Amino acid sequence: MSESLLVVNCGSSSLKLAIYSRNAERQAQVLAERLGTSEASANVEYRGQRETIRLPEKANHEQALSAVIKHLETCEILTGKPIAVGHRVVHGGEAFKTATIVDEEVIDAIDRCSELAPLHNPVNLTGIKAMQSLYPQTPQVAVFDTAFHQTLPDHAYLYALPRRCYQDWGIRRYGFHGTSHAYILRALAERLDKPRSSVSLISAHLGNGCSVTAIEGGESKDTSMGLTPLEGLVMGTRSGDVDPGLFDFLQRKGLSQDSISRMLNQDSGLLGLSGKTNDMRSLVEAAESGNQAAKEAIDVFCFRLARYIGAMMASLTHLDGLVFTGGIGENSRRVRAQTVGHLRLLGFSVDDNANENHGKDNGGRINAEGDYGIYVIPTDEEGMIATETLESVDVQAGTGED
Ligand code: ADP
């Protein structure tokens, strides 16, 4: 019998698939891109080797998944049926508080959450259904970006809107990147050799999307993203917080609802401010060569982040660590130093040498002992999906810890 586990992450025009061993170690990964176009292709990485495979012309997610699986089986990278398949699902609304084994009811509930995540949930469901038809006997597990934040207290998830907005339409703060924040909790608890339930931290996930979360007692207590992943921090192309009065103002200027939505989601953030790119590495290079707009984009990004870190302190009774993660958090010395520079009054400071090498000589720690810990910890969302999938399957089989 096979001892492998698959993790599937379907994005709007891409798909990621990874193969894990029974103890959640990654064996192979595949990234398929430009799905739906004549250039659809997939890159496979296995034991340090890389190869590109062509996919059927205009392959959709289902066709791409089936072509990729066939290739992995032919090359014997995947042998036998997997023990389970874990799927990233963006929005679980209030229906899902943990990773959940998929059945018809779960599929219906994910479908009902599609109005909250129209770009993601339908395509996530396509991945689930495709894997169900390839492996009808294998448990499929849905791992939700929102689940970890289902512990938010009312005061953190309610908007100050008329009650009916929440009661009739489910308008509330849900939070996202839960898989990454949950992974960071586990990783910091391990680093500090403490039980998860006693670790108190602020996790700053800074990638193309960015969010910050306060975690205490093993639970999310507050987070910067809300009803949608647009709220909160400055991101690659998303504005984060704006005055809601902006919508009226822009409509009066003649912009349609669609163009306002596109502006806030795709043309704002680092890209909008710099007028050049959403890529932090390029912005840092440009700022260092004197580009003023690039410098301002970084300044706004770091200041907003620092404000949110300060705000997260309101949810905690103590603090073991502020953790930077995601492509920017793990790699940008400048963003970390500049952000922490705004937080001196709260007792944060970085050690320049430790920050310079991303805390690598010191288990990720980038400041002196004695102060609040500040850490750089690489996230692993797919590894976390694999872990949660195995835990769900083991609990169902009665072999895991409940
Ligand atoms: P995604 O959310 O798509 O997974 P990532 O977590 O990979 O994104 O993060 C992408 C961001 O990380 C980009 O803005 C990229 O420029 C930034 N990044 C990666 N390496 C560096 C680096 N060395 N310095 C600054 N930013 C970096």
Image (cartoon, rainbow, N blue to C red):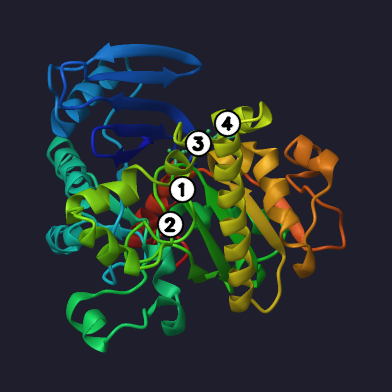
What residue is disc 2 on? 240
Judge: label 4 CB < 8 Å from ligand 1.
yes
x, y percentage for residue 360? 75, 37
x, y percentage for residue 393? 35, 54
What residue is disc 3 on? 25
| N-terminal label among 1 and 3 | 3
Amino acid type at mark 3: Glu
Amino acid type at mark 4: Arg
Q: Residues within 10 Å of mark 2 (few under 14, many from 20)?
A: many
Q: Residues within 10 Å of mark 4 (few under 14, many from 20)?
A: some
Looking at the image, is mark 4 or mark 3 nearer the viewer? 4
Amino acid type at mark 2: Gly
Is residue 297 visible to the viewer in this orientation of the structure?
A: yes
Judge: label 2 CB < 8 Å from ligand 1.
no
- Residue 381 to residue 252: above or below: above
What residue is disc 1 on? 235
Q: Residues within 10 Å of mark 3 (few under 14, many from 20)?
A: some
What residue is disc 4 on? 281
Image quadrant occupied by the N terminus: top left
Q: Quadrant of residue 73?
A: top left
The foreground one among 401 and 205 is: 205
